[in-house]
Amino acid sequence: MARAENKETAGPVARMVATVVKRMRVKEGLTQEQLGSRMGYTGAAISALETLSQPVSDDMMMQLETALGGGTGIFAEMRPLVRLEKLPEQFRNYVQIKQAARSLCLYATPNVHGLFQTEAYARAQIAGGYPTPTEERVEELVKARMDRKAIFDKKPLRLIELILDESALLRKFGSEEVMREQYLFLLECTRRKNVTIQVLPLDVGLSGENAGARGELNLVETDKHTRLVYLEVQDESVLIADPVKVSTYAQRYAKIRAQALDPRASLGLIERLAGEGT
């Protein structure tokens, strides 16, 4: 049943990879078993790739480049497209928009925002979800999440703001060591000139106001200077372009920022959680 579903749901990139692999294999006079042997896979695995019975893995894409690419780089170029196609459909457009963004203003709760996660934290969070993903799926999603960190170093530098609900810092994933590594990574991020991190404290509501009570919020300024809002909850998401709605969300974000600890105080809180503070 799963194999039939894979054939039905395979996207255009996966279909292109299957077609290219088969044509290049046949052109070189290789059987599926021979190509599989070159790559460290079985002939059945190559058959599953070519017939779309099984999604092509990231490792397989790397092996295809070595075993069949012939120095063309074709499979290396298709790798990011394959990874993108495996993301939830409603998330794909946002990923592409975010990678080209001029600025990101992010409010994260109840977990550390994916862009700021360490590999170990991301793996623990993804693997612990429900329905439980396969190990291969976990690694694909972790790799995709880590790849998105490239935006930190894009030139010209992008302005990236993160407001973390304090609950996101206190919620534990993996182990104490995983959490300490995560705290230290956040501290490392604060040393970047284009990154600002603030924390919205747990007791913010005692003042009578808590603009962050409605959940996470992502504001994006595109490369065309258009502002968008991305919202995600329970694996469902929406990308909002309506200027009136975007304006309301931008005002809410500004209010959250105003209610958060300032960057220096936020740094001190994270340092204490990491065991680095006094």
Image (cartoon, grey):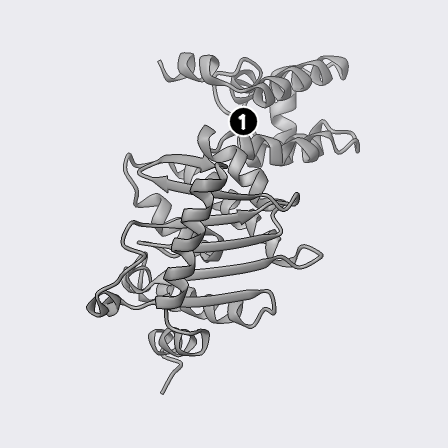
Q: Is residue 277 above or below residue 193?
A: below
Residue sitting at 74 percent across and 14 percent down?
Answer: 29
Q: Is residue 274 visible?
A: yes
Residue sitting at 31 percent across and 50 percent down?
Answer: 215
Q: Residue furthest bottom?
A: 278
Instruction: Determine crowd level at label 1: few under 14, some 14-19, many 20+ residues with C-alpha closer than 10 A.
Output: many
Q: Is residue 54 above or below residue 66?
A: above
Q: Is residue 153 left or right of residue 241?
A: right
Residue sitting at 71 percent across and 12 percent down?
Answer: 26
Residue 161 image position (x, y, % from top left)? 50, 61
Residue 198 image position (x, y, % from top left)? 42, 68
Q: Is residue 33 left or right of residue 20?
A: left
The C terminus sits in image quarter: bottom left
Q: Is residue 139 visible?
A: no
Instruction: Give the residue type that dot 1 points to.
Output: Val
Which element is circle 1 on? loop
Residue sitting at 30 percent across and 68 percent down?
Answer: 201
Q: Residue furthest front?
A: 244
Please name whichever residue, 237 or 118, is drawn nearer the observer in this view of the structure. 237
Residue 10 image position (x, y, % from top left)? 50, 18
Q: Is residue 180 left or right of residue 65?
A: left
Residue linked to disc 1: 56
